[in-house]
């Protein structure tokens, strides 16, 4: 779940982890990723170079004849590829270009969803978010997107200085003691 404006990143280099044919995976420096915005260049140093383009559904398209699948998890920025060849002895470098959202508000748990496709969740607005209206973008692992506007208003009452607080307390105690002082009780006659 992203909050705020989209921010573009270009030329972010990564060394993926994996064994054999893969998957060879890494993670972007920023997330969540805007579905459909990512491109990564895979360089198997000394062998081949290929571009992978985000299809907006959690996978990439590529012209590589060695492609055995590619992966992108929008909420966390995890991405990578598999190959028809064993890449264990090769140096791999991924160079990523993508868009992410200004603030990551992905909650720890899963949202409560209904059969009609609506959902609800609890999350915390990140520290430092100024008052105003922000776009909230929610996406799933398949690139489905929903947006809404969130109004942030962190106004709190002003804190009174200690002097006026003490004066008000003294007045409250004085008024209370005047009201609760012993009052005469009227005499009742018995017949």
Image: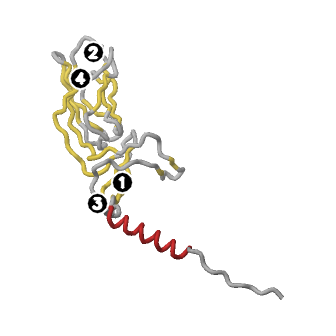
Dot 3, how many residues are within 10 Å of its Cα: few (below 14), some (14-19), or many (20+)?
few
Figure check: 148 above or below 52: below
Question: Closer to the camera: disc 3 or disc 1?
Answer: 3
First in residue order: circle 2 vs circle 4: 4
Q: Name the residue rendered at 25%, 51% in the picture.
A: 5
Dots 2 and 4: beta carbons under 8 Å?
A: no
What residue did someone put label 1 on?
Answer: 147
Left or right: where does residue 78 sit relative to residue 47? right
Mark 2 to mark 3 CA distance (whole Å): 49 Å
Q: Name the residue rendered at 28%, 46% in the picture.
A: 101
Q: Name the residue rendered at 27%, 21% in the picture.
A: 66
Q: Quadrant of residue 89?
A: top left
Figure check: 162 above or below 66: below
First in residue order: circle 2 vs circle 3: 2
Which numbered disc covers residue 15?
4
Where disc 1 sits, the SS reads: strand
Where disc 2 sits, the SS reads: loop
Dot 1, how many residues are within 10 Å of its Cα: few (below 14), some (14-19), or many (20+)?
few
Is residue 88 in sight in this rendering?
Answer: yes
Q: 125 or 79: nearer the eye?
A: 125
Coloured how? secondary structure
């Amino acid at each position: 779940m992203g909050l705020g404006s989209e921010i573009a990143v270009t030329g972010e280099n990564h060394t993926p982890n994996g064994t054999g044919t893969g998957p060879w995976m890494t993670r972007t420096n920023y997330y969540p990723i805007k579905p459909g915005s990512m491109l990564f260049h895979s360089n198997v140093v000394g062998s081949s170079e290929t571009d992978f383009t985000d299809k907006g559904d959690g996978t990439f398209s590529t012209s590589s004849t060695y492609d055995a699948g590619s992966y992108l998890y929008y909420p966390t920025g995890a991405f990578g590829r598999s190959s028809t060849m064993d890449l264990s002895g090769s140096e791999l470098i991924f160079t990523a270009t993508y868009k992410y959202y200004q603030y990551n508000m992905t909650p720890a748990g899963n949202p409560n969803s209904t059969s009609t496709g609506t959902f609800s969740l609890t999350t915390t607005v990140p520290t430092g978010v100024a008052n105003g209206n922000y776009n909230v973008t929610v996406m799933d692992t398949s690139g489905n997107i929903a947006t809404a506007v969130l109004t942030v208003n962190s106004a709190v009452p002003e804190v009174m200085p200690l002097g006026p607080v003490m004066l008000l307390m003294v007045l409250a105690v004085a008024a209370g003691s005047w009201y609760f002082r012993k009052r005469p009780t009227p005499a009742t006659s018995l017949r």
